[in-house]
Amino acid sequence: MRINETQLAQVNDRIDALVSAGSFYGKKLKEAGITGVHSVEEFESLPFSEKADLRDAYPLGLMTAPEEEIVRIHSSSGTTGLPVIIPYTQKDVDDWATQFARCYEMAGITKKDRIHITPGYGLWTAGIGFQLGCEKLGAMAIPMGPGNTEKQLQMMMDMKSTVLCSTSSYALLLAEEIEKRGIRDKIHLKKGVIGSERWGETMRRRIHDELGIELYDIYGLTEIYGPGIGINCDKGTAMHYWDDYIYLEIIDPETLKPVPDGELGEIVITTLVKEGAPLIRYRTHDLSRIVPGECPCGCKFPRIDVIMGRTDDMMKIKGVNVFPSQIEEVLRDFPETSSEYQIRISHLDGKDTMRLYVETNGSVDFRDLSERIAVKVKSKIGFTPIVKVVELGVLPRSEKKTKRVIDERYN
């Protein structure tokens, strides 16, 4: 899907705003002699923006609207370096609410639902984004925020929450706690809107089976509003995204050229109407593909596939490029394993070592299972890991995002 005339006009409007404001990114465009684009080819020759650029603009160098029009800031959840500060005008906040409400509607959520919101509030966009969309829709928000699982479950039962908003890690933790306490008959959840981290099919199936709810994968990132710029419908896991607010490209992360629809690559996003901090050709480093053709659900908004991983998820071990998603694909063939795994990479005696920890129930032969998994992993990635099989529940659970890869080589 290539950029259309309407979207080109919107991009030119944002370029004018950036250059006129003399913001950090506006200055970069001006220095490059860019005042507008008049064709698909000109658009695709525009420079990319990167997270490093946004950090360089700290604290308010990205601000493009006049300060008196800025009503809020948010910050990315990254843990390294300076944070990225994104300013929002009231229109940006309203536009975000509209997109998020569309996501809820796509998931079949109505004003009669009670939406249990567990992601964090504050500078992070998650909790407040889920609440914004809920209020725009007119449903009842239960703004719990993260942590205190005991209280979460009590409120879930007492308030008869029908929709759970969370990371996949926390949804799994809640499912396990509900099972442990034997309170599933007191839980009224029907749907889960899950975001913030990539999750595999095994985890999706576990949460679905243990909570008995329909699951929806929501997409977004702080730099581009926050969660709510796309969600899957009930006809599959591909996510519709709102192309009246964002233009989305898929590029080859090596050549940086757009790839044909249907091919895997890196998501690049341009905001079409954002005022506080417009971004042009922002490299997300998320890996997905455009799903071509019309969706059976009848929705005309375009689709991307589930997020397959990130370009910076890649681990180089023994000279081989390895992605966590490859390990998940292997484990999917072993129904006796749970969705939880952990990869630890260390450097011992002059060589890299990869240890893979996986969970299973007590009814299987741990040694036999570890040997079978090791053989399958080797056939997938080219070398044999040390596989450690542990009992269900041994690996850490998280109320936020689960850390699955621990690289001890640089500690």
Image (spheres, grey):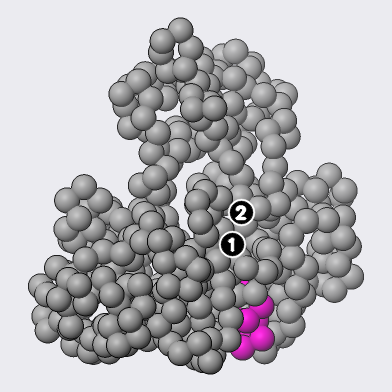
N-terminal of the pair, mark 2 or mark 1, is: 2
Q: Residue at x 51, y 56 (%)?
A: 82
- Quadrant (top left/top right/bottom left/bottom right) for the C terminus: top right
Image position, residue 229 (x, y; %): 46, 74
The residue that mark 1 highlights is: 194
Q: Is residue 407 above or below residue 218?
A: above
Magenta: main secondary structure equals helix
Please tell me in which quadrant of the rendered image residue 193 appears: bottom right
Magenta stretch: give its range.
130-137
Question: Neighbour class for label 1 at 10 Å: few (<14), some, many (≥20)?
Answer: many
Query: Label 2, label 1: how many angstroms apart (C-alpha)?
Result: 6 Å
Instruction: Name the kind of residue labelled 1 in the image.
Output: Ile
Image position, residue 262 (x, y; %): 24, 59
Q: Is residue 279 above or below residue 396?
A: below
Image position, residue 160 (x, y; %): 82, 72
User: In the rendering, which numbered label is found on residue 95?
Assistant: none
Residue 121 in view of the camera: yes
Q: Nearer the viewer, residue 97 or 54?
A: 54
Please tell me in which quadrant of the rendered image residue 274 appears: bottom left
The residue that mark 2 highlights is: 168
